[in-house]
Image: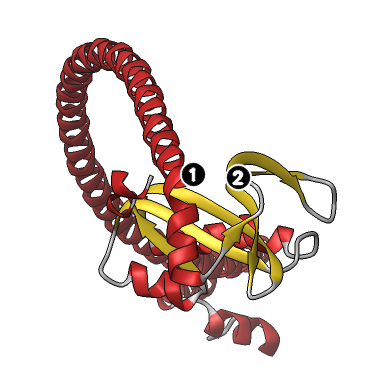
Amino acid sequence: MGLDLSVAFMKKIEKLPSELKDTIYSLMEEIERHRAETVDKADFNELKGIVRELAEAQKQTEQQVRELAQAQKRTEQQVKELTQAQKQTEQQVKELAQAQKETRQQVRELAEAQKQTEQQVKELTQAQKRTEQKVDKLSVALEELTKEARNTQRELGLLVKEHQKTREQLGGLSMSFGYLLEDRAYRSLPVLLQRDFGIKLIDRLKRTHLYDSFADPIEVNIFGRAEMDGQVVTIIGESKAQLSRKHVDSFLRKKIKPLERSYKNIFKVLVTFMVSGPDVESYAREKGIALYYSYDFSDNLI
């Protein structure tokens, strides 16, 4: 080319895009032909100015391309970040969907549990009604039982009173029989004791109260003084309609033992209509007690 262009300018043209570069070269060739034919120097300078403006425009274009490239990189980074964010969002949506499924399952289970609870409440309500009915029946029955109990209590009160009267009557009869037995013993024992033990009464037998060593009075059914083998003895006895081992022990504990310190040489006597068991008589004799039955008190002895 005949144009007077610097090397640097030519290097810049080489760096331009091929289409722009071809265009510049075409212009330069056209300028060269035009210069060779008719174009004068002023026109040539004008063309050079145009070429410079085109080069400057190319610079601006390159700057814009670089800025677009940077913008493209930023856009790609944003797209990358948006893609990552999208993936995270999709994961969150997936997790939310799973959580939603679980929530629905829980809601279904709660609904089922609620149905069961409502059924249980219904059953409990029915059971409560049945219980209330039973309580009402029991209340009625209790009222009836209370009335019957009151009637029974009144009847028991009457029975207790009748029983007390019966006991009083029996006590009276027992005392009457006791007195009767004792009265017969007073008349018959002097003869029987002298016959069986050689005892001769000094005083007649009687009922009385004796005092123990603490000056406490003790009722004695049969009491008297007598001589036995040259010694003075004290006769202390008791009568029982039906004699038992328990009565024997009670006689020794309550009558004989408290009076032993106050009265020496006690001769023990028990009189009865009958005994409660086959061993009572032998038990009494083992304890040193003279035992007589009502049938021993024959009228022939009086």
The disc labelled 2 sits on which kind of residue?
Answer: Arg
Q: Residue 38, percent across and down?
A: 52, 65
Residue 130: image quadrant is: top left
Count of numbered badges drawn on the protein: 2
In this picture, is 149 found above or below 96? above
Identity of the residue drawn at 65% across and 48% down? 203
Q: Which mark is residue 250?
A: none
Q: Residue 240, percent across and down?
A: 41, 48
Q: Residue 241, percent across and down?
A: 36, 45
Q: Which mark is residue 204?
A: 2
Classify residue 191 as left or right of residue 127: right
Identity of the residue drawn at 35% across and 21% down? 160
Identity of the residue drawn at 66% across and 81% down? 9
Point out the residue furthest to the right here.
214
Counting residues from the N terminus, which is met first, the one under dot 1 or under dot 2? 1
Q: Which mark is residue 186?
A: 1
Residue 302 visible in the current orientation: yes
The disc labelled 1 sits on which kind of residue?
Answer: Tyr
Instruction: Indicate the quadrant containing the C terminus: top left, top right, bottom left or bottom right.
Output: top left
Q: Nearer the viewer, residue 250 or 22?
A: 250
Q: At numbered mark 2, what does the secondary structure look like: helix, strand or loop?
A: loop
Scheme of image coloration: secondary structure
Residue 27 visible in the current orientation: no
Identity of the residue drawn at 42% across and 53% down? 271
Classify residue 284 as left or right of residue 134: right
Dots 1, 2 in contact, CB < 8 A: yes
| Cα distance between the residues tagged 1 and 2 | 8 Å
Q: Nearer the viewer, residue 89 or 289?
A: 289
